[in-house]
Image (cartoon, helix red, strand yellow):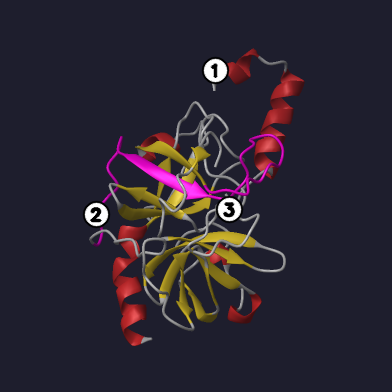
Amino acid sequence: MAKLFEMRLSELVLVIFLIGVSTAEDRVIGGIPAVPHSVPHIAHLDGPTFFCGGSLIESEWVLSAAHCYKPAAYFSVVLGDHDLSHDDVTEQVLQPCFVIPHPRYNAVTKDNDVMLIKLSESAVLNAYVQTVPLPPPYVEPAVGETCSVCGWGNVQAAGNVYPSTLHCVHMPVLATSSCNDVTSYNGQVTENMFCIGSLDGGTDACDGDSGGPATCDGTLTGVVSWGYGCAYPNFPGIYIKVSYFVDWIHAVVSTN
């Protein structure tokens, strides 16, 4: 924040305005291309006018973000992909059977921003398509632990460059108290959320990464949810704590 005070007043007002209007709900800046098929649980949701990520948690179930919701007939779920520019023989394109956003999802605050997608048929698990383990219920992400965030989203903080190949970035979990400081999100990070990245900026998820995985020590710890802009100083990405929704996930899966 100190750098902002060195700007002229007009420049400061412009920065604040841009931050205010650049809320990236589809929220990888500062990452590198992933080794092909090194993230075998990742999925992408493809519709006529939208693109989101997801994670295969069981052979018939994908976990994503509730703000990515579309009716089942509107999109396909693609597994085993790496390069979007061509059809890989490893790909499995499956249709959703139904889509279940969390019943307490709040579109304004983005609280409870999780969604389950049941596939119309089971994915074939192999070297390219695998499930990712869920954490135990209510285990808090460890501050300082390095997590991997992957997706096909925008790789430019200023501009729009969408790679054809999967990109990943490795970032630490930050203390919620830092992200809720008045110089950052000022209390908007709820107990169901946590932040990953750097207060210095430069690394982040971005547009097109929404709903995708944040894995910590091989466990699906977070779901890409929201943030102000992409890779802005003082505004790291906000993720949903998967551990807080494990009971709900198990309940939905067992009854459907």
What amino acid is labelled 3 in the image?
A: Asp
Question: Residue 127 appears in which quarter of the rendering?
Answer: bottom left
Q: Kindly identify the residue that appears in the image at 69 percent across and 34 percent down.
A: 158
Q: Are marks 3 and 2 in contact (CB under 8 Å)?
A: no
Query: CA separation, marks 3 and 2?
Result: 34 Å
What amino acid is labelled 1 in the image?
A: Ala
Q: Kindly identify the residue that appears in the image at 27 percent across and 50 percent down.
A: 140
Answer whether residue 147 is magenta in the image: yes
First to last magenta residue range:
137-166
Pointer 3: what residue?
83
Q: Earlier in the sequence, mark 3 or mark 1?
A: 1
> Residue most toward the top?
6
Label 2: element kind: loop
Q: Kindly identify the residue that appears in the image at 49 percent across and 83 percent down.
A: 120
Could you tell me if residue 238 is visible in this image?
yes
Q: Position of residue 32 (x, y in %)?
A: 51, 37
Dividing the image into 4 quarters, which one contains the C terminus?
bottom left
Question: Residue 243 appears in which quarter of the rendering?
Answer: bottom left
Left/right of residue 164 with respect to residue 63 in the rendered view:
right
Label 1: element kind: helix
**Where is 112 relative to 191, above or below?**
below
**Where is 154 relative to 178, above or below?**
below
Q: Position of residue 107 (x, y in %)?
A: 57, 63
Q: Which mark is residue 139?
A: 2
Left/right of residue 16 with respect to residue 43 in the rendered view:
right
Residue count near mark 3 (Cα–Cα under 10 Å), binned few <14, some 14–19, many ≥20: some
Query: CA separation, marks 1 and 2?
Result: 34 Å
Left/right of residue 22 with respect to residue 237 in the rendered view:
right
Pointer 1: what residue?
2
